[in-house]
Image: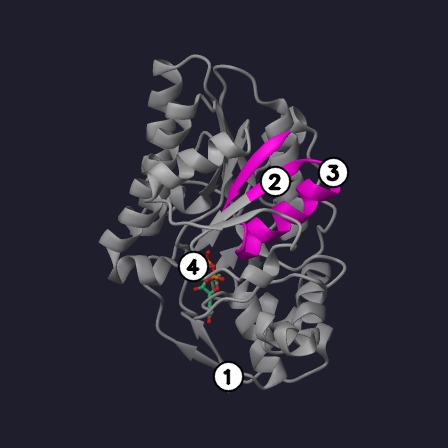
């Protein structure tokens, strides 16, 4: 298959590129390198530094590489940042997807695998969350992706040859088994890397955002899915796509861990102390998000391999300790 991977230099996108080329697919990457790393994309993979807003240039890429399917990862992904800069999130995530979809329409590219998010559910009315749960995002990040889901539904009605799958990610963590690529964000806001940075002494401490939630230990509960398992679901979803498909799948392991449990696991995996303080709740954070991913498992045959959060954190720890300055370390290595 000829694929365009947007955001292929980012954390999740780079793991997708790696898995897709190992399966023999032909991949071209676009990424604006705002938060991505050129080093995360293998040198043999064609790379174009482009922003999603550059519709004309994207058309050129779709034509040049005879793209059949687009996997769309490029996005801004921080809940807190989205609360402070909503227009920026709608511009990048919603208008950016629109520009990409327009380019695809012009080129007759009709297969789309979309990175959606559990944040489209907002404060869930029940857990574990099923695809049929009410979607009511409570922050601009979730809403920016939810709007795209709506656009995609409209598109499939207008063009029965179009087929898409929207994959609603829960919390993605971990790194590739060979330790070559991993998570390297600037700024880093995610829990798992920040906990490990605190263990490494790269940060003074970790701040737990709220311990007064209605959960057993008072901290937020999330479902941490390994990045390689997440990408396996993308491959299965891509292979299943047919004309007229409008599919939605939750991608999580189906088990929630509290922030407190993640801290304890990280202490045992690293054998280090993790200085911790308790702070205010972070705006836009629901108390509990964990998936019922039965539909992905039964319809796609998806079976996450790394279902123990220990393994997820171990793989992240291997990456961070071998790349203490992220891709910066790699540049110094070579
Ligand atoms: N969190 C925290 N301290 C941090 C970062 C995150 O307590 O430094 C909490 C956050 O409030 C949420 C969970 O950890 O409940 C996961 O947050 P993360 O930013 O990793 O992912 P998100 O849930 O926003 O996608």
> Can you name the residue that lies furthest to the left here?
87
Please determine whether, in this image, residue 236 is positioned above or below residue 27.
above
Which type of secondary structure does the marked residue at label 3 adopt? loop
Instruction: Give the magenta part as a residue range.
Output: 1-28
Q: Picture coordinates of residue 265 (x, y %)?
A: 67, 69
Q: Which residue is mark 2?
A: 27
Label 1, label 3: how far apart the Cα atoms are:
40 Å
Going from N to C along the chain, the mark reached first, 1 or 3, is 3
> Can you name the residue that lies furthest to the top here?
160
The reply to whether callout 4 and callout 2 are in contact (CB within 8 Å) is no
User: Dot 2, crowdedness within 10 Å: few (<14), some or many (≥20)?
Assistant: many
Label 4, label 2: how far apart the Cα atoms are:
45 Å
Disc 1: residue Cβ within 8 A of ligand 1's nearest atom: no
Q: Picture coordinates of residue 165 (x, y %)?
A: 51, 29
Residue 23 tag number: 3
Label 1, label 4: how far apart the Cα atoms are:
24 Å
Q: Is residue 110 left or right of residue 303?
A: left
Label 3, label 4: how far apart the Cα atoms are:
44 Å
Residue 214 tag number: 4
User: Dot 1, crowdedness within 10 Å: few (<14), some or many (≥20)?
Assistant: some
Q: Quadrant of the N terminus?
A: top right
Which type of secondary structure does the marked residue at label 2 adopt? strand
Q: Of discs 4 and 2, which sits in the foreground? A: 2
Choose top left, top right, bottom left or bottom right for residue 108.
top left
Q: Which residue is mark 1?
A: 205
Q: Is residue 88 left or right of residue 164?
A: left
Which type of secondary structure does the marked residue at label 1 adopt? loop
Residue 12, magenta (yes or no): yes
Q: Residue at x 68, y 70 (%)?
A: 317
Q: Of discs 3 and 4, which sits in the foreground? A: 3
Q: Of discs 1 and 4, which sits in the foreground? A: 1
């Amino acid at each position: 298959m000829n694929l365009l991977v947007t955001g292929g230099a980012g954390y999740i996108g780079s793991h997708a590129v790696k898995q897709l080329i190992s399966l023999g697919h032909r991949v071209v990457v676009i990424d604006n390198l705002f938060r991505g790393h050129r080093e995360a994309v293998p040198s043999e993979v064609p790379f174009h530094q482009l922003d999603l807003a550059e519709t004309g240039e994207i058309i050129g890429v779709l034509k040049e590489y005879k793209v059949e399917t687009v996997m769309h990862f490029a996005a801004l992904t921080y809940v807190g940042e989205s609360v402070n800069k909503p227009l920026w999130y709608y511009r990048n995530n919603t208008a950016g997807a629109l520009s990409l979809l327009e380019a695809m329409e012009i080129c007759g590219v009709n297969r789309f695998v979309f990175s959606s998010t559990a944040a489209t559910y907002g404060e869930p009315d029940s857990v574990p969350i099923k695809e049929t749960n009410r979607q009511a995002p409570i922050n601009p990040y979730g809403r920016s992706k939810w709007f795209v889901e709506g656009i995609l539904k409209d598109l499939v009605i207008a063009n029965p040859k179009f087929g898409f799958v929207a994959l609603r990610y829960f919390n993605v963590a971990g790194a590739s088994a060979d330790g070559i690529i991993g998570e390297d964000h600037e700024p880093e806001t995610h829990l798992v890397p920040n906990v490990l940075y605190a263990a490494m002494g790269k940060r003074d401490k970790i701040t737990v955002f709220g311990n007064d939630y209605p959960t057993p230990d008072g901290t937020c509960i999330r479902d941490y899915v390994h990045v390689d398992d997440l990408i396996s679901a993308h491959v299965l979803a891509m292979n299943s796509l047919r004309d007229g498909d409008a599919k939605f799948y939750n991608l999580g392991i189906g088990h929630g861990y509290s922030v407190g449990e993640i801290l304890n696991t990280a202490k045992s995996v690293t054998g280090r102390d993790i200085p911790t303080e308790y702070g205010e709740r972070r705006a836009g954070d629901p108390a509990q998000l964990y998936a019922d991913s039965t539909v992905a498992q039964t319809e796609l045959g998806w079976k996450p391999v790394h279902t123990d959060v220990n393994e997820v954190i171990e793989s992240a720890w291997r990456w961070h300790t071998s790349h203490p300055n992220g891709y910066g370390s790699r540049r110094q290595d070579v």
